[in-house]
Amino acid sequence: MPLWLELLDAAGLVVLLVLLYGLALVVRRRVLARNGGTFELSHRMRPGQEPGRGWLLGLGRYSGEDLQWFRIFTLSPRPKCAWHRAALTYDDVRDPEGVERTVLYPDHVVVDCTSPEGPVELAMSRASLTGFQAWLEARPPGTDWSR
């Protein structure tokens, strides 16, 4: 078999694998969103870096008392990070600065939070921020609101 036919077969296989990967990402997103409560949510894995560095695009999902974060370009059905509602506090919101405007989804704002593990930086739309604040404030009866 000529070399060009082998290269054509290899290129066809690569295209098929890329298409299958894309289809798997679509199916995964549908499975994650089947119960509702999902939204576009970016997470800065190492807060405190220079603006624009360390951001990863993803999906957020409310699951009971937890906010789960899933990376967007992975096939894993498990969340990469999760924050418990009682342990997460909302600190501030700001507009993206410099390179962050091109790294994050359009029209997203950066939300600074605190957890027992340290600072947490999230980026979401203003509509999602309203839902996030409502979710944080909707703690069960008996919650210590002084924290």
Image (cartoon, rainbow, N blue to C red):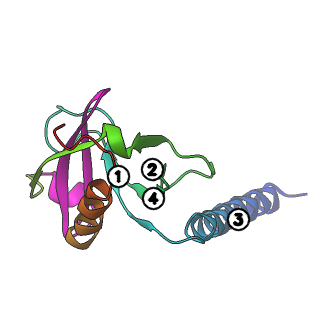
Report whether 86 appears left or right of 113.
Answer: right
Q: Which residue is mark 1?
A: 141
For the residues labelled 1 and 2, the Cα–Cα distance comes to: 13 Å
1 vs 2, front mark = 1
2 vs 4, front mark = 2
Picture residue at 19% right of the left edge, 37% below the top: 147
Q: Secondary structure at mark 1?
A: loop
Is the C-beta separation of discs 3 and 2 under 8 Å?
Answer: no
Of the two numbered discs 3 and 2 on the same chain, state the one appearing first in sequence. 3
Q: Which residue is mark 3?
A: 20
Residue that lies at the very extreme toward the right in this rendered image: 1
Q: Position of residue 8 (x, y in %)?
A: 75, 63
For the residues labelled 2 and 4, the Cα–Cα distance comes to: 8 Å
Of the two numbered discs 4 and 1 on the same chain, state the one appearing first in sequence. 4
Q: Which residue is mark 2?
A: 65
Picture residue at 46% right of the left edge, 50% below the top: 68
For the residues labelled 1 and 3, the Cα–Cα distance comes to: 47 Å
Of the two numbered discs 1 and 2 on the same chain, state the one appearing first in sequence. 2
Three-letter code for the amino acid on which mark 1 is drawn: Pro
Residue 62's label in the rendered image is 4
